[in-house]
Image: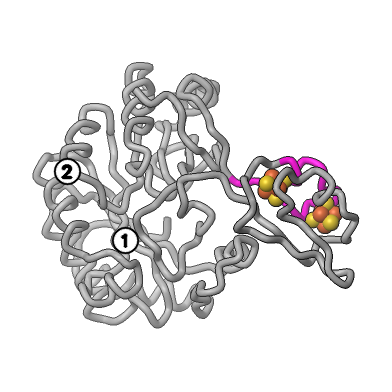
């Protein structure tokens, strides 16, 4: 059993990642590279340094502690050489302005489980539990399986948010410990799916169909990205997909928000796609377009 994983957040009192009040554990590592990703800091399965140049006062404390000379100053300008960074976190510890932040920590099963169990009374009163998200939790499969197993053994309702890209055998292994799958569908257009996420649609659909055939509970989660996956045929396809899979109880849409853009800049990612803001009017129109093709609930997550 792999008893450690790289976790980048544990969010308490979450109301948007499954039923009731939940603790959501965010794991780093993802096989997809969605152009609009809300959490680009989740992509790599290793700790990373986020740097906000606008907060830097050029005090030089980071350069003084860095063991690999990743920080330097040229003509009064702070230069951060990301390729030299070992993600040790020493500079973030001494930075007085919060310009540096280490994202991702190795956490043990026992440590994460204790954080989850601490809120058991809230789950019992609200029908909540634990949700694993990311990134893609299946990218750190051994930890994900062990944590789901341990939470389930403690009587905690478990949910897994997934993009579906992992070996089917691994999904089979977690079925006994996973009460709900929050299954991400980015686009039902095969060409767009590959173009926008870097991964073909076919394996995603295979996993979804296999989970549905296994009789598990599924909620479809669909990002709404203006100009990218909001065509009428795609929205109709989401509604039809939900309608045709008995295991799917609901469709939840997630309108694009630009938070990922600032995180991408802090990670030094230059090719992040900044979509137009998803207005309430846009979101309601998309929900209506999906709802026309299914009798199941369609709502904002
Ligand atoms: S995280 Fe460590 S290696 Fe990276 S820049 Fe900071 S001090 Fe240097
Ligand atoms: S410690 Fe923080 S504020 Fe000081 S130079 Fe480094 S990044 Fe800038």
Q: Which residues are magenta?
A: 90-103
The answer to whether residue 102 is magenta is yes
Residue toward you, 227 or 219: 227
Residue toward you, 4 or 34: 4
> Alpha-carbon neighbours of circle 1 within 10 Å: few (<14), some, or many (≥20)?
many
Residue that carries the numbered disc 2 in the rendered image: 168
Residue that carries the numbered disc 1 in the rendered image: 298
Q: Position of residue 105 (x, y in %)?
A: 57, 37
Residue toward you, 100 or 117: 100
Q: Position of residue 146 (x, y in %)?
A: 34, 25
Q: Position of residue 249 (x, y in %)?
A: 23, 49
Please name the residue shown 42% across and 55% down the image: 301
Is residue 279 in view from this perspective? no
Q: Secondary structure at mark 2?
A: helix
**Quadrant of res 298:** bottom left
20 left or right, relative to 252: right
165 left or right, relative to 252: left
Is residue 281 in view from this perspective? yes
């Amino acid at each position: 059993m792999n008893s450690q994983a790289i976790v980048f957040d544990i969010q308490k009192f979450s109301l948007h990642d499954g039923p009731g009040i939940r603790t959501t554990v965010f794991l780093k590592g993802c096989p997809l590279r969605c152009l609009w990703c809300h959490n680009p800091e989740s992509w790599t399965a290793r700790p990373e340094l986020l740097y906000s140049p606008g907060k830097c006062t050029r005090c030089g404390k980071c350069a003084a502690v860095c063991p690999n000379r990743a920080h330097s100053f040229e003509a009064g300008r702070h230069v951060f050489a990301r390729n030299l960074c070992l993600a040790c976190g020493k500079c973030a510890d001494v930075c007085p302005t919060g310009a540096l932040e280490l994202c991702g920590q190795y956490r043990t099963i026992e440590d994460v489980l204790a954080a989850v169990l601490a809120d058991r009374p809230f789950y019992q009163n609200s029908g909540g539990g634990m949700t694993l998200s990311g990134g893609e939790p299946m990218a750190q499969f051994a930890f994900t399986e062990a944590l789901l197993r341990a939470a389930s053994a403690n009587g905690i309702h478990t949910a897994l948010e997934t993009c579906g890209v992992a070996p089917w055998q691994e999904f089979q292994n977690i079925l006994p410990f996973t009460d709900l799958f929050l299954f991400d569908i980015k686009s039902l257009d095969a060409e767009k799916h590959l173009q926008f996420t870097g991964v073909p649609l076919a394996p995603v659909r295979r996993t979804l169909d296999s989970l549905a055939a296994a009789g598990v509970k599924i909620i479809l989660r669909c990002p709404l990205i203006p100009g990218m996956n909001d065509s009428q045929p795609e929205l109709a396809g989401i509604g039809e997909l939900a309608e045709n899979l008995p295991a799917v109880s609901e469709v939840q849409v997630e309108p694009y928000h630009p938070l990922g853009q600032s995180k991408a800049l802090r990670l030094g990612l230059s090719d992040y796609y900044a979509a137009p803001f998803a207005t309430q009017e846009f979101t309601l129109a998309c929900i209506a377009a999906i709802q026309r093709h299914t009798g199941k609930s369609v709502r904002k997550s």
